[in-house]
Image (cartoon, coloured by chain):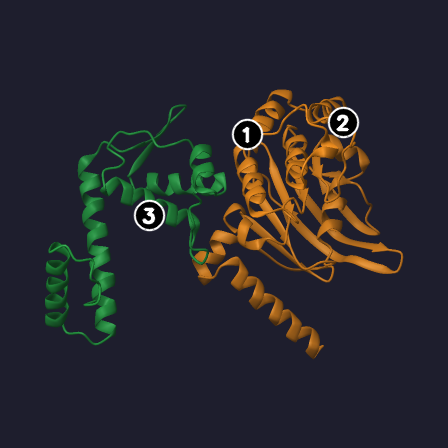
Amino acid sequence: MKDDFQTSSPIYLQLADRIQRRILRQELTPGEKLPSVREMAVASNVNPNTVQRTYSELERMGIVETRRGQGTFITQDESRLEQLREDLRQQQIRTFVQAMGEMGFSPQEILSGLKEYLIEQEEGGNNRDSV
Amino acid sequence: MIRFEQVTKKYLTKTALEGIDLELPQGEIIGVIGENGSGKSTLLKLIAGLVRPSKGRVLVDEEPSHRRIARKVAYLSELETYYPFFTVQQTVDFYETQFADFNRERAREMMDFMQLDPQAKVKNLSKGNRGRVKLVVTLARDAPYILMDEPLSGLDPIVRNSIIKGLISFVDLEKQTVVITTHEINEVEALLDRVVAIRNGKIVKVVELDELRLNEGVSLVEWMTSIYSDNANQSKEA
């Protein structure tokens, strides 16, 4: 299937984001080799230069490392990956809280709403009406 | 690098391109976009040395473009340019005799990838498969510049997708530069590094797409719509 990217934000960052999520979900594990630039380009239907930029960005962040002649690997630095997990968690919470704040919800309302929602989810409903 | 210096091209009384200054960097996939008759194909033909500028110069690696530039430039024509009585394999063999940089092994891999039957007669192929044959003979060359004039036009979505995948799979951007004219902006959006927008024979803008997305938060289609409407307003005021 074709991966669709949003065309209004940089594709290399969206691809970096997807790879980070796969690391957090442990679909990609520390030390694992990423597909070659070309393989990744073909799989995601994007320009190989875009993939190269994605890998460079992830390398700059210390999430992957490129070994000359061997390819690009997820870092084995577990503390860096733990940090990534925490960063993305904070980032998502910030985005959510900010959006709720813009709609005028108080911290109490945000907390109670979130709790209710999570409880409903846990009880097996895919009921999203409460959001 | 490809460079246009103050290039004007007229066909008899009709001006196809006017006062073009342009530099196309190496190692990128560059889209030339614009309406029918905007001068896209002429721009490509000037690079390929198939037509000569009326004024100015077109340089490919600092060499003025002329017919012999074909040894550096692989050109995929908008028109159908095969011999109908050839089989797919004979077409490939023919191209191999014409170009010293023809990579027979890559041609074979591409035929496999595109699921083309080498023994099929070209005239009996579907339009989509003829489009695929054109891609094979163009990309099988180790030419530093690949020019493709409307490679997706008139083809169904499955064929368009396989041509895009074929391009991504077989082009080597460390050694090659691709210039592609197209209408199918949505489909090539994720493929392009840079876009040259042309209107009425003039360059409206040249933009690097990830810069555009990062700095302005718009897609290529949104950007096109906005620059073309600005441009239309300006020409009304003028």
Q: Amino acid at mark 3?
A: Asp
Q: Could you give the CA–CA distance between mark 2 and mark 1, rounded to whole angstroms?
A: 21 Å
Q: Residue placed at 48% from the left, 43% from the top?
A: A46
The C terminus of chain A appears in which quarter of the rendering? bottom left
Q: Residues within 10 Å of mark 3 (few under 14, many from 20)?
A: some
User: According to the image, label 1 marks what residue?
Assistant: B113
The residues bearing labels 2 and 3 have C-alpha atoms spaced at a distance of 48 Å
User: Is B92 placed above or below B233 here?
Assistant: above
User: How busy is the neighbourhood of tag 1: few (under 14 within 10 Å), some, or many (20 plus)?
Assistant: some
Residue B35 disc label: none
Which quarter of the picture shows residue B174?
Answer: top right
Secondary structure beneath dot 1 equals: helix
Q: Could you classify mark 2 by the number of other residues whose Cα lies within 10 Å: few (under 14), some (14-19), or many (20 or more)?
A: some
Q: Judge from the rendering whether residue B19 lies leftward or rightward of residue B173; answer left or right.
A: right
Q: Position of residue B60 (x, y in %)?
A: 71, 39
The chain that appears orange in the image is: B
- Residue B86's label in the rendered image is 2
Residue B86, image x, y percentages: 76, 27
Residue A107 placement (x, y as % from top left): 13, 70
Residue placed at 20% from the left, 62% from the top?
A127
User: Disc 3 is attached to a residue of which chain?
Assistant: A
Residue drawn 46% across the image and 38% down it: A41
Q: In terms of depth relative to the viewer, which is nearer, A22 or A31? A: A22
Number of the front mark, 3 or 1: 1
Residue type beneath disc 2:
Phe
**Quarter of the figure with the N terminus of chain A:** top left
Q: Please identify, in this view, whether the residue under mark 2 or under mark 1 is nearer the observer.
A: 2
Question: Which of the chains is green?
Answer: A
Mark 2 in CB contact with mark 3 (< 8 angstroms) = no
